[in-house]
Amino acid sequence: MKYSGLVQQVGLFTILMVILLDLLGLFGPIDSDVRDLQQQHVGRSPSPMSPDIVHVDIDDGALQRIGRWPWPRPLLAACIDELRDAGARTIAIDLELSEPGLDPAADRILADAIQSDTVLAMLHQDDGLRNRWLESGGTTEGLNTLRELLIQDIDLEPDRATTLESSDREAFAENELAIKREVLWSHPSLAPRGIAERSIQDAYTQQAESERIAVERGLLDRSNRSRGSSMDRLPIPTLLEQAGAVGYVHISRRDSDGSVRSIQPIQTGRSGAATSLGAAAALHFMGRETTHGGSFEQIDGELLIGGDIRLPLVDDALPLAWPFTPHGTGWTHLLRQDVGDPIGSGHLSIGTIAELVRGRELQAENLETMTTLSLDLLRFLRQDAELEVENPLSDAVQSEIADEYEFTLEGIPADSQLEMVFDDEDALAHARALRAWKLLSDSIDDGRIEIDELDAALRRLVDDRLVFLGWTATGSIADFVPTVAGARTPGVVVHAATANMILTGHAYGHANSWSVVLILLLGIIVVGLVGSTSPLVATVCSLFVVAMYVLIAAVLTFSWLDLFVPVAAPATGGLATWIACTSTSAILIQRDKKRITRQFRARVSDRLVDTLIDQPSAISMAGVRREITVLFADLAGFTTASERLDSADVVALANESLSTLARQIVAEEGYVNKFLGDGLMAFWSAFELQEDQAAKACSAASACTAAIASIEPAMLGVRLGIATGEAIVGDCGAPPDLNDYTAIGDTVNLAARLESANKVFSSRILIDEETMLQAGDTIRSLPLGPIVVFGRSTATRVHALVDEHVTDDAIASATALQRAIEAEDRTAAAECLESMGEFAILHPLAERWAEVVDAGGELVIRMSGK
């Protein structure tokens, strides 16, 4: 290739620029989106979430059946006990339990349910105080000074903080409670007088106790601490005393689009470090002694957990590897182990467990009632009011009562009125007691069956499994985050996905370090193709190479190797290199074309030169017949201007005016064929058929009138005629000089006659009917009627191209006249002519037609000269 050296240099420079942008992180967000799509849509072997994981959901159904959250803590405790009794090995509770309930007894009941198999949620999150302070106009020095002042006097108010600068006092006023909260958090022994401050102090005193218990019990990694924040939360002390582990639940690491794609291995606070709830739960489930951040170690880009579990790290964070099922990655599908499993497999509504709890409570109440009722019946049967038996619910006692029921109520319908059967009051009371016994006995039997079924189903689901209890109800806002598993993924599902990675080792590799090499490889391949082949072959091959790379990197390596390979930067590098190289080549070729143009400009037009260079076959020496649209333009008032101006000014005015006309025509892709003194001829479809040629010609004509009107001094106007039809296009002069590439034929003559006809009708632009039909809705026209122009024997329907200054009523009036003319209705035509008198712009047209109508001959206007 002629320009291969320079093209290669441009290609290599483009490659280096893409590498620089990649190193600056420009393609990171794009690759993140690509990886989301890969996990969601690329087919691969199913890898559902571990069957050892089960979700107990606080869902919409539970809230509808049981009631609004929060539920009474004894009910929550009973649900936890049910999970434990059903065999759950580890119960991870994704609920914030950092505040005591209104009833201390209820807290104690919940504390009794929290045992060593339970993992509780905690919060480590930034309070954002410093940013809010600075946004309020405060200074860092002022904030530090204020902290010291509040330690000395926690009840200090902004207007009394006179040692602060005015801007710091204003920031203090806007953030007073938040700042005092932070000081009370770090100094809970202070004694504030305000009600809100005392409430905060009580909460932080309790939190300090929770931190002490967590440290003493080894629930936090004391060796790794930070300053923490006043937003850190641990469960209340009574719950921590027996808990098996704690894990943070606040997901603070998010990408620029708000999505959660990775989590921090550990988060630190003033009392120590904790890992996520999912990691803590998984380690607890596996029986590891250390469940906090102390078991985590970062080695060579990997997270080493407990010395034997390795997971990849990217930017010091753990990328989430979402399970994949034949049903996709939606969070409700993650535990569907088989294709036939229903949606929500592995999920159980806590409402079902609560109903089991309530069922047991009701069964206990029924049994207690049954005990009393059975003893009363037995005493009646044995006629011993003081009778006592060891177990009124024993089979023997119940059998005896059943026999009495059969004897007394045999044959009596269950819905009958006993008063109609038994006259004696004692007998009636006895019969009623027997009927109540029967109903209660049946209810107990049904309840026992239902409880046994629920208990068995719960045991099948949670026995020896890791249970995550948390929010999935749609009404909750804070517990949902956007992830690969859905735009509103419950936070507890994110923690379960983390646990799944630790339990199964499921993770995806990240080949981010390959990016530079891949950019170079694709770029060099594209440079070689562009520099050594034709533009078409280079384009096809370059795009094929980039497409194949995207297929291999985005689909095959992920599907077969579970490996994320950079896609955005290498693909961009390949495309950018192709664009840069082909553009450079095109620019160089164009430069040579311009050189050829300059050489031939003395003989032919630039447009024709370009056509000759690119498509020599487009020029026919014999001429080609095709449909064209021809435009003739003439400068109105030029003769008068010539008389008033000297010769130099006349030439300057002519040059400026004709150049202006030519620019408008060229802008609409017309071919300016020749200049005719104070006018010009142009046509469309000069080299190939232009489908919208009529619309473009009309648009150019309108632009010409506006452009000429803007020329100073305002001495000239312009008249234009446009016609569309067949003509001979080609070298119609004296070949082989190629000095007159033009068009000839009746259409050309018609356009010229229409231009001159403007004088008769005081119009600016006249077009024939074919032009009007082809231009369609792109123009606004006024019909003039059938006109026989000079030099023709047949009439042509002519229209005037008009602008918004011609009203719709005027157009309607002219149209009505033409309908009358077509119908040869002279009376109607006369009436129309009379109505046209209302419109001054129609007077010239009305005058001509009045002459024709009054003459009584053929209803056409005949032009007597050019």
Image (cartoon, rainbow, N blue to C red):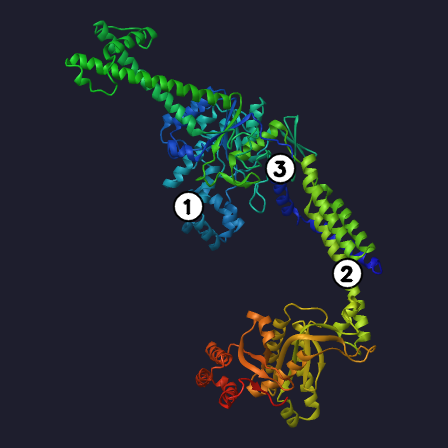
Distance from the alpha carbon under mark 2 to that under mark 3: 42 Å
Report the side of 141 relative to 789 (left or right): left
In the image, which is nearer the foreground, mark 2 or mark 3? 2
Q: Which mark is residue 584?
A: 2
Q: Quadrant of residue 663?
A: bottom right
Q: Which mark is residue 84?
A: none
152 over 757 or under it: above or below: above
Packing grade of label 3 (10 A; few <14, some 14-19, many >=20) is: many
Between 696 and 735, the one lying in front of the other is: 735
Whether residues under marks 1 and 2 lie with C-beta atoms below 8 angstroms apart, the answer is: no
Q: Nearer the viewer, residue 1 or 808?
A: 808
* Amino acid type indicated by mark 3: Pro
For mark 2, does the 10 Å Cα neighbourhood hold few (<14), some (14 to 19), or many (20 or more) residues? Answer: some
Residue found at x 40% / y 18%: 449
Q: Which residue is mark 3?
A: 319
Q: Nearer the viewer, residue 156 or 612?
A: 612
> Which amino acid lies under the numbered mark 2 shown in the image of this protein?
Thr
The image shows residue 190 at horizontal and vertical percentages of 43, 37
Secondary structure at numbered mark 1: loop
Q: Secondary structure at mark 2?
A: helix
Q: Circle 1 sits on which residue? A: 156
Cα distance, mark 1 to mark 2? 71 Å
Which of marks 3 and 1 precedes in the sequence?
1
Q: Are marks 2 and 3 in contact (CB under 8 Å)?
A: no
Residue 470 placed where, x, y %?
48, 32
